[in-house]
């Protein structure tokens, strides 16, 4: 019996390949129009920005195209992005854009269920990419006959005789979901690590519940973590640190309009490193998106504002002489991101301050860029800087030398920053169709 997912996949494939076959049957384009950058096979540049991007697997399975290393050598540029679905799976978005003399633009989606194995997801991605490239090759005249088209269509999984294109596809609102879109997860982990003079032990557990619909987004998460660390010192003594942290967080968001969303974020937790034995807060929030939310994987420009109170109870008296306090705080965040054929870039500005004293603030700016300057040459950079003046939780006693060296206790600071700049230049053969997995894990770990 065919599942709903299989029916949807085959219906989509049948429609797409039928259109491609019609384009092929109508006759090839002129010789000048069908000649690709690298011959009679379409040349493809794959631009990945999501997990699950196994380029070697794609090259191994889709051998009827030329995979090239730089976009300037491609006939079609494929950008693959992804985002998490409400059930914990992943939706992959494939944007195919023609380059040079080829006027083409199309988008495909594939949703991987949370229960899918890596191999199942890769096979479906190969199928989706193959269907998209087949359509591009057909409408741009890379196939001279219907027989050529059918030969390649068999490779990407054309519909078989058992599929009836007239078979009714079940609509989403007709599916009976006994869980009403709720998804629950439980997890835990323990880790032992050490050597003769150092021993660490970590145990943590977590659980979550989420429900995501086109209108509502609700996430609830809880975790607990135990850490034990022992270090033998040169004076025959032993430094030991034991701590248990826990936390609970929630997010409830509502789609108010096409570009507006409202919600509330909250948390309750214990964080020893930040001198807090108990903290609880609830902050209503408002978000505006200049672009449609559906385009978030390719371009996004949002403004996010939240305001609310937070209660803190401290382990040690703070630098302001407090053992507990309730303070109101407001924050504003502006974020812009783009992923295009020239590369990708993003910038985020954040600012917050306490309402009882605007001099207690935190301002940060973060940006990254990966820009293709010319054929084979690209530059990348990442930088962030923060001006910090809101550490009201700091212990008046400060951190010991051991806590400072092991970063076990937060210390006072006015700012922090990081900068990273790099470049990439590649030349030589533009083809990368060959896959060779020999000595994949070889090599001695020299020290």
Image (cartoon, rainbow, N blue to C red):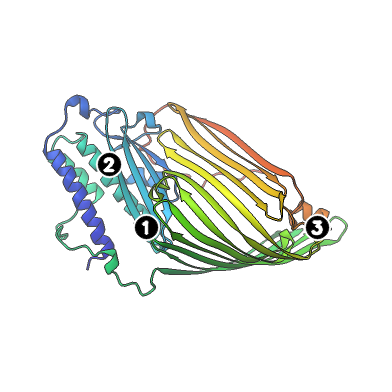
Q: What residue does disc 3 label?
A: 320
Q: In this view, does 375 lie above or below 300?
A: above
Residue 147 visible in the displayed image: no
Residue 330 visible in the displayed image: yes
Give the CA separation, mark 2 to mark 1. 20 Å
Give percent across and percent down for residue 285: 54, 57
Give the CA separation, mark 2 to mark 3. 64 Å
Quick one: quadrant of the N terminus?
bottom left
Q: Earlier in the sequence, mark 3 or mark 1?
A: 1
Q: Nearer the viewer, residue 349 or 305?
A: 305
* Image quadrant in which you'd find residue 41: top left
Residue at horizontal 37 percent and vertical 61 percent from the top = 113
Q: Residue 112 got which mark?
A: 1
Q: What residue does disc 2 label?
A: 133
Quick one: quadrant of the C terminus?
top right
Asked if marks 2 and 3 touch (Cβ < 8 Å), the reply is no
Q: Earlier in the sequence, mark 2 or mark 1?
A: 1
Mark 3 is surrounded, within 10 Å at the Cα level, by few (under 14), some (14 to 19) or many (20 or more) other residues, namely few
Mark 2 is surrounded, within 10 Å at the Cα level, by few (under 14), some (14 to 19) or many (20 or more) other residues, namely many
Give percent across and percent down for residue 271: 69, 63
Give percent across and percent down for residue 175: 29, 69
Q: Nearer the viewer, residue 210 or 257?
A: 257
Q: Which of marks 2 and 3 is nearer the N terminus?
A: 2
């Amino acid at each position: 019996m065919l599942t709903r997912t299989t029916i949807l996949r085959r219906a989509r494939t049948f429609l797409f390949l039928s259109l491609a076959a019609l384009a092929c049957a109508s006759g090839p384009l002129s010789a000048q129009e069908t000649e690709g950058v690298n011959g009679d096979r379409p040349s493809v540049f794959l631009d990945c920005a999501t997990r699950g991007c196994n380029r070697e697997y794609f090259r191994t399975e889709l051998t009827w195209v030329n995979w090239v290393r730089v976009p300037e050598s491609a006939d079609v540029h494929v950008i693959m992005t992804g985002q998490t679905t409400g059930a914990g799976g992943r939706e992959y978005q494939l944007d195919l854009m023609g380059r040079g003399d080829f006027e083409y633009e199309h988008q495909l989606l594939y949703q991987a269920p949370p229960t899918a194995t890596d191999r199942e997801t890769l096979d479906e991605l190969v199928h989706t990419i193959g269907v998209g490239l087949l359509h591009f090759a057909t409408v741009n005249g890379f196939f001279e006959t219907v027989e050529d088209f059918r030969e390649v269509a068999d490779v990407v999984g054309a519909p078989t005789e058992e599929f009836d294109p007239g078979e009714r596809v079940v609509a989403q609102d007709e599916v009976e979901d006994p869980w009403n879109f709720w998804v629950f997860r439980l997890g835990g982990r323990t880790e032992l690590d050490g050597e003769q003079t150092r021993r660490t032990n970590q145990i943590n557990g977590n659980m979550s519940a989420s429900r995501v619909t086109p209108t509502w987004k609700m996430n609830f998460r809880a975790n607990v973590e135990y850490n034990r660390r022992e270090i033998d010192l040169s004076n025959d003594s032993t430094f030991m640190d034991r701590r248990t942290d826990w936390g609970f967080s929630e997010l409830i968001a509502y789609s108010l309009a096409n570009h507006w969303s409202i919600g509330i974020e909250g948390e309750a937790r214990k964080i020893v490193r930040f001198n807090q034995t108990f903290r609880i807060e609830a902050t209503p929030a408002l978000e505006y998106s200049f672009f449609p939310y559906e385009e978030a994987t390719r371009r996004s420009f949002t403004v996010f504002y939240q305001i609310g109170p937070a209660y803190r109870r401290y382990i040690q008296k703070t630098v302001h002489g407090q053992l507990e306090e309730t303070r109101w705080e407001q924050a504003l965040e502006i974020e812009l991101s783009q992923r295009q054929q020239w590369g990708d870039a993003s910038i985020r500005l954040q600012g917050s301050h306490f309402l009882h004293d605007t001099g207690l603030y935190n301002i940060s700016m973060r940006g990254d860029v990966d820009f293709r300057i010319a054929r084979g040459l690209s530059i990348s950079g990442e930088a962030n800087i923060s001006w910090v003046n809101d550490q009201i939780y700091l212990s008046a006693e400060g951190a010991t030398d051991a806590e400072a060296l092991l970063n076990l206790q937060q210390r006072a600071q006015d700012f922090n920053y990081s900068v990273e700049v790099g470049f990439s230049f590649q030349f030589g053969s533009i083809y990368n169709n060959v896959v060779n997995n020999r000595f994949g894990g070889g090599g001695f770990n020299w020290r």
